[in-house]
Amino acid sequence: MTKINKPLFAVLVIYILCFIFRFIEYFIIRTDQTFWGEAFLHKLLGIVVLFIAARLYNFKAQDIGFNKNRAVKYTLMGLLFGICIYVLAYSIEIVIAVSNKNFQSLQLYVSSYSVDKNIGNQTSLLFFVICIIGNIINVTMEEGIFRGLFTKMLEKNHTFFVSVLITSVLFGLWHFIGPVRNYFDGSSSIEGMYVNIILLVTASGFIGFKFALLTKLTGSIYMAMGDHFVNNTIINIFHIVSSTGCDELMFLRIAIAQSVSFIIVLFVYLHKKDCR
């Protein structure tokens, strides 16, 4: 395995390269605002960067978390974990809507995700397929890069905790581009942009930390990929409709889901660590 000189610097170079791809797609190509409804091009390029970097540093697939051993098992575990958590979150949101006497229905259609709402209403099977494929590309790239490659590189010079802290901060910052674009497009005030950046970056950072713990617990990125896939997909296809709008408490739903899942994963991680 090739020695990595200044791994933090190498991580930042790769991160900036991937972020440039992300910036170009969000501000220039705007794939998520087209027929596709998904910003997937920079994720595909990110997978290419992941492959090149792994070859450059002589990482095998299993070194960065793509371990074939129990891949199906851990993927299914991640999917099941994510589904159970969101069943709880949706249930709480529905109970709140019912108690306020404005719950109407739970609907199935494809939308594009925004910070505090969903946009669009597509019911064609084609859009469900695009949503699923787009999120598979997304979790492969983000888990492969952040929880796989970056963590592996940083652990050459840093402890697991420090490595995860760095990758979680980077993962949080990865998500600020959406609120910034909304502001420049005129769909958000500058105050709204700041609030959404703080909320989204903080939440994404904690979610990234949770995914890193799942990766450490299982020895692969597949359970994190499964959970990540559910987190990204379910809010785009299952919608709570009330008499005053749709998905009005979506951020609360996500906050409940991620808080509960983070606590569970952290508890299991600390328990297993104490048992060693």
Image (cartoon, rainbow, N blue to C red):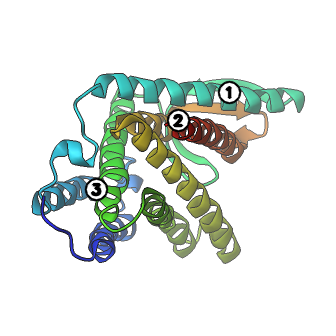
Per the image, the residue denoted by label 3 is 149
71 shown above or below 263? above
Q: Residue furthest right?
A: 100
Q: In the shown orientation, is residue 252 left or right of residue 34?
A: right
Measured as percent of width and height from the top left, residue 223 is found at 40, 34
Q: Is residue 135 left or right of residue 85?
A: left
Q: At label 2, which amino acid type do we have?
A: Lys
- Rendered image quadrant of residue 13: bottom left
The residue under the point 36% across, 54% down is 39
- Nearest the eye: 22 or 255: 255
Residues under numbered marks 1 and 2 in contact, where contact means CB atoms less than 8 Å apart: no
Choose top left, top right, bottom left or bottom right for residue 192: bottom right
> Closer to us: mark 3 or mark 1?
3
Residue 88 has which mark?
Answer: 1
Upstream in the sequence, badge 1 or badge 2?
1
What amino acid is at disc 1? Leu
Residue 189, image x, y percentages = 66, 73
- Would you name the residue on which mark 2 appears? 272
